[in-house]
Amino acid sequence: MGVVTNRKTLQNKNTLLCSPVRIPGKSVTESEERENPGMKGLTSLHYAVALATFMPLAATAEFTPMTDSSMRSTVGQAGVTIDLSAIVTVREIAYEDQGFVIIENLGIGGAGPIQSALGQAVTGGNSLDNLRMTIDIAGPGGSDLAAPWGLEKFNSSVWTASPDNQGDHGEVAVPITDGDMVIGLGAQNQNELVDFGLSIDRVGLRKSGPIPPATQSPQIIMDNVLLTGVLGPTDIVVDADSDNININSYFSLDGSLRTDLYVPILLDWQEVGFDFRMHNERGEDVLKYTNSAGEVVSFAHLQADIGASTGPVEGLRVNLTDLSGDLDTTNITFADGPSIGSVYWTDVQISADLNIYGH
């Protein structure tokens, strides 16, 4: 990598309008499946490229043009910085095996519209904005990175750690060596939070037939999913030697959903609704920060390794090393009845190792 003299920033303001997506359940013949079981053709590099490029590039985008002189001045610069503002809408996503799993009206953007729908104070905007992505190929010893890894991003005058903080938050340090790709996500303006909103009208099952969207209504298994959250320090490291991808992210969530659950005592399906919040404010592991604007945020944590599995059946391995925090499930209701109460979960920690492949 060249000597850093002036990091150029590519500003990208996106609006994504996606057509219905068909994801076939079987993309090979039975004979090809026997000869090439699982996902032999997939490598971690493919996933890394998708993570690094999907949001800024897979869209109709407005880019700030570069002059000839500015293009010449970028030659030999180290790394890439992308400042992003985006709204994503997808009418329908359909996964096909024989029948379909349907996700209808997926929306991703700022927290504002979801906060309004939940009856909360509106502090976010319409777009997923104030987000900065840095992409670097590390030098010897993991040098020459645009942003520090993990919670070191908060080592600034803008953020103040709470005196209540304790525990290791489930984070495992990732060695960054020569040739590794490091993708960092953080705020453009450190005085403001990176808030986001996610909405899904409904998730359901649909019988085999024409490629959706179709007139046939799906069997609903989940609906009215409304989520807001804050994205904290997030890093993706692609190991140059193994192609393993490590994802390390701090975040908070706040939202509500309604879903159909089978209740054995009633021998019937019942619609269950509840509000929830995921954070890390209680218990033996606490992680809270206050920014210069006086906003207090508590972050839950997720860390996982993704790569090719080497077991009896080759596929995609997802090793969830940590998903931890506190979870509040409040205003629990059955159908349209009154609330039956709330449940609070403290110091939740989940780890799991998954091997995903076709059959």
Image (cartoon, rainbow, N blue to C red):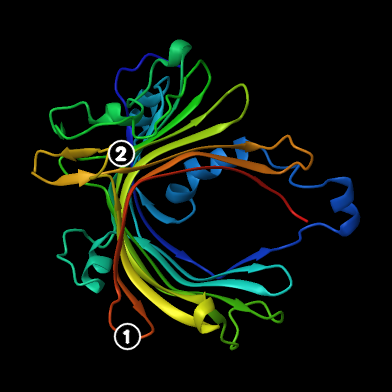
Q: Secondary structure at mark 1?
A: loop
- Image spot of residue 266 (x, y percent): 50, 83
| Residue found at the far bottom of this picture | 215
- Image spot of residue 166 (x, y percent): 25, 31
| Residue found at the far front of this picture | 265
- Give the residue number, with chain letter if any, for mark 1: 337
Q: Secondary structure at mark 2?
A: strand
- Image spot of residue 88 (x, y percent): 40, 62
Q: The disc labelled 1 sits on which kind of residue?
A: Gly
Mark 2 crowdedness (10 Å alpha carbons): few <14, some 14-19, many ≥20: many
Q: How far apart are labels 1 and 2 at the CA level?
A: 42 Å
Nearer the camera: disc 1 or disc 2: 1
- Give the residue number, with chain letter if any, for mark 2: 186
At 91% from the left and 55% from the top, the residue drawn is 31
Relative placement, left or right, of 277 versus 302 is: left
Q: Is residue 36 above or below residue 182?
A: below
Residue 4 visible in the snapshot: yes
In depth, the one of 53 and 161 nearer the eye is 161
Relative placement, left or right, of 118 versus 258 is: left
In depth, the one of 275 and 154 nearer the eye is 275
Residue 329 visible in the snapshot: no
Identify the mark nearer the N-term, 1 or 2.
Answer: 2
Quadrant into which the C terminus falls: bottom right
At 56% from the left and 86% from the top, the residue drawn is 217
In depth, the one of 262 and 355 nearer the eye is 262
At 29% from the left and 54% from the top, the residue drawn is 229
Q: Is residue 128 above or below residue 9?
A: below
Q: Is residue 74 above or below residue 349?
A: above
| Residue found at the far top of this picture | 140
At 60% from the left and 84% from the top, the residue drawn is 214
Q: The disc labelled 2 sits on which kind of residue?
A: Gly
